[in-house]
Amino acid sequence: MAKFKTLSLIFYSLFILISCSGTKNKIEFVPVNRKDKKSISSFDGDLKRYIYIYTEDFLIKNPPTDLEELKKIMIDYRNKKGVPLDKLDTDLYSMGFYRYTDDTSYFLTHESYDTWEGQTKYLGSQEQDFLGFIFSKRCPADTTQWQTNILWTIPDQEKLKKDGFYELKQENIIPCPKPKDPCLI
């Protein structure tokens, strides 16, 4: 009888270990508290023209390590959970994604201000945990249309140590439609 209990205990232990080892960590998006989701900026280079920006930030628990898979989940999340572009009265809509860490989770209970003045800790300063942005901006020729891009970092510790930042890459997901040729009308 003692052998049966021992074998049963070993069997159940192995069963639990095998079933737990096969589970994949679930990817989870956690919205970050922001002081202002809508802001004004002149970052597009024209200091006389201000643009209106709507920004949301999210922390990702268990992000994929594969870059293509990471880009895909960010795009899917934007398409499913983002604000519909036709509902926005802004010039640019941005969703920022950061890795969920002890440093970034600070902003779940503290507001992140997009300012450099007097603030010692803001989400944008957590470059080592930055994963990417998906941003949409109005097309110049037809402001009812939107161009969407994805921007992500290439983690390179040497570049971070040397230059103080990671290398960024950008890809156009949805281009602006070509303007209609007035000669063809």
Image (tube, helix red, strand yellow):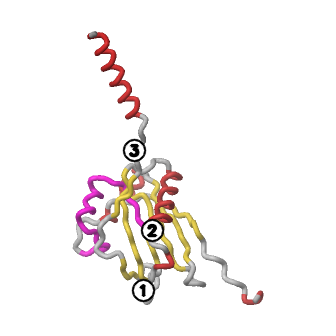
Q: Dot 1, how many residues are within 10 Å of its Cα: few (below 14), some (14-19), or many (20+)? A: some
Which mark, residue 25?
3
As helix, strand or loop, the secondary structure at mark 3 comes to loop
- The image quadrant where one finds the N terminus is top left
- The image quadrant where one finds the C terminus is bottom right
- Asked whether, in this view, residue 111 is left or right of residue 52, the answer is left
Residue 28 is situated, as x and y percent measured from the top left of the image, at 38, 54
Residue 125 is situated, as x and y percent measured from the top left of the image, at 32, 63
The structure residue drawn at horizontal position 35% and vertical position 75%, both measured from the top left corner, is: 37
154 relative to 2, above or below: below
- Is 149 colored magenta in this rendering? no
Q: Which of 95 and 131 is in front in this view?
A: 95
Give the residue furthest to the right: 184
The structure residue drawn at horizontal position 45% and vertical position 74%, both measured from the top left corner, is: 93
Q: Dot 3, how many residues are within 10 Å of its Cα: few (below 14), some (14-19), or many (20+)? A: few
**Mark 1, residue position:** 50
Closer mark to the observer between disc 1 and disc 3: 3
Q: Earlier in the sequence, mark 3 or mark 2?
A: 3
- Is 106 colored magenta in this rendering? yes
Q: Find residue 109 and report its image quarter.
A: bottom left
**Mark 2, residue position:** 82
The structure residue drawn at horizontal position 35% and vertical position 29%, both measured from the top left corner, is: 16
Which mark, residue 157?
none
Residue 121 is situated, as x and y percent measured from the top left of the image, at 25, 65
